Image (cartoon, coloured by chain):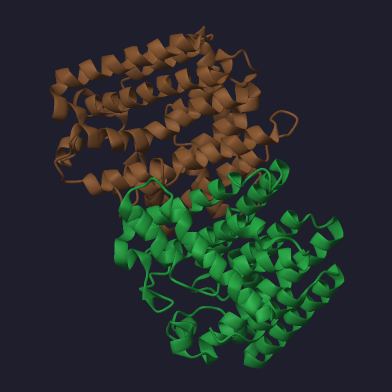
Chain colours: A brown, B green
Amino acid sequence: MVEQFLREQKQLVEAQLPRYIARLNAPGTLKQAMLYSLEAGGKRIRPLLLLATLHAFHKEIEIGLPVACAIEMIHTYSLIHDDLPSMDNDDLRRGKPTNHKVFGEAMAILAGDGLLTYAFQVIAEMPDAQVAPETKLALIAELAKAAGPEGMVAGQVADMEGEGQRLLLEELEYIHRHKTGKMLQYSVLAGALLAGADEAQRAYLDAFASHLGLAFQIRDDILDIEGSEEKIGKKVGSDIENEKVTYPLLLTMEGAKEKLNFHIAEAKRYLQAADVQDDALRYICDLVATRDH
Amino acid sequence: MVEQFLREQKQLVEAQLPRYIARLNAPGTLKQAMLYSLEAGGKRIRPLLLLATLHAFHKEIEIGLPVACAIEMIHTYSLIHDDLPSMDNDDLRRGKPTNHKVFGEAMAILAGDGLLTYAFQVIAEMPDAQVAPETKLALIAELAKAAGPEGMVAGQVADMEGEGQRLLLEELEYIHRHKTGKMLQYSVLAGALLAGADEAQRAYLDAFASHLGLAFQIRDDILDIEGSEEKIGKKVGSDIENEKVTYPLLLTMEGAKEKLNFHIAEAKRYLQAADVQDDALRYICDLVATRDH
């Protein structure tokens, strides 16, 4: 039931994303490059978190669709830029050639720039009848904070600067809290803002999303060792090969799994405190804890 | 008098930009990289256009300062990304090493991403007491259009795809209308939105800015042939060396100068029609027509 609800929401987002690109009056190759990575699949966990948060407040899912798509655009831009030769230099992403492998490096940079910029337009142009101007401004300001130099970009810089270093656990957590955590938190916050959650609920949901974000990353590190190449769409063991500091490396595999369970339990505890219809958010939580890709 | 006014406004913007970076809670190197290019100088013509437009409506200049800085952030991000090895591969910009030459390619990409994202935050967080939420949303939506895949990014893509091609005049104009024109037009539009200009005035000012933008680019092409290397801060003749299609190439130097004069005259005609206090905007117009760097 919840599973089907989330599957339908995922389809809704995946049907909407190409429509946003199609309506652009822009060079064809640019639109292709933007669309290529938007359509490269993935779990769509950020949009789903937003839509599941709306569901938690019994709100109409449709009002969240533009922000859900904007979040996925920002996530996609970050993957395109991260994969560039001067960054992680990845040839494959989810088993498909990365954007710059298909469209060239210059176009990949521009496709990323385009997606990042367009995301803000999509939110700013939401119909006033559905979302109050003040709410839209809060959605935009918080998105910029989560994605920008105090958020995701900061995490990417810290990750880069930590390469080849012997990181402490708190430095590793800084990276993850910013690189992946901030946008996951934003996804829940955006849902809460759209739903008109009160301050206490927002605080509980924020704590929920923060723990979920760390759990997500720990599971990622575990999958890089224990996962199936076929399912995760990239080589297993790449973290060790790249001498990346990970949770299993710092805490042993057993310690990493314990920490994963701790954050999942904390996430659920805060979710319960928020006192909302939490079936879908709880399901996503379990998904993060046990996902195999 | 107008000259002094504009000099003061330029100083105001240049004093404000580092403050926006200083307040960021972000990795030090990222802030340095963002600041380095923001402080690399330049004419600040976009912020000045905005502030001169506010002046044209006898509005307080201060209310425009955040948007003026946001515009300069977006302009600066576009220069950082344009200079990258996979794009124009420039080592120098305004006589100084380009961002990636100082901070490396990955950091330059991230500094650009950070500036682009932060620009939207700066506008979204303007004090409500000074600017109505609806106005802020219009400023954000129009900025995304001007800078994004329908605007500046489209121009950059068209420019890239036109390399080594025998472009027609209309193709050259498409590039310039988007690559530089849209953000110049936005600068004037943002001033008009903040000043509460009526629809007719906005239309006249938009036509003014459109002609000014083309004039700006034609002057650029002329300077690449007739300019002084010391003043423009890069090699003269680089367009010919790079086999770039320019106005002098398509129209002869005489034809290019005629076209420059035409667009300046048209700009002034529309400016007059807007029926505003136009001394500062007129001065910028003359500056564009005769600038030597």
Q: Nearer the viewer, residue A201 or A188?
A: A201
Q: Give left or right: position of A86 versus A272.
A: left
Q: Nearer the viewer, residue B177 or A176?
A: A176
Residue A14, percent from left and from top = 54, 30
Q: Nearer the viewer, residue B134 or B255?
A: B134
Q: Give left or right: position of B63 versus B91.
A: right
Residue A69, percent from left and from top = 56, 34
Give the answer, above or below, for where A202 lies relative to A279.
below
Q: Would residue A49 be seen by someone viewing this image from the given angle?
A: yes
Residue B261, percent from left and from top = 73, 85
Q: Residue at x 19, y 39 (%)?
A: A244
Give the answer, above or below, for where B105 lies relative to B275.
above
Total numbered labels:
0
Q: Residue at x 86, y 60 (%)?
A: B200
Give the answer, above or below, for where B42 lies relative to A231.
below
Give the quarter of the figure containing the N terminus of chain B.
bottom right
| Location of residue B58 by image quarter | bottom right
Q: Would residue A108 be seen by someone viewing this image from the given angle?
A: no
Q: Residue extending furthest top?
A: A1
Residue B113, percent from left and from top = 44, 52
| Location of residue A159 by image quarter | top left
Q: Give left or right: position of B102 versus B140.
A: left
Q: Residue at x 56, y 56 (%)?
A: B70
Q: Residue at x 58, y 33 (%)?
A: A67
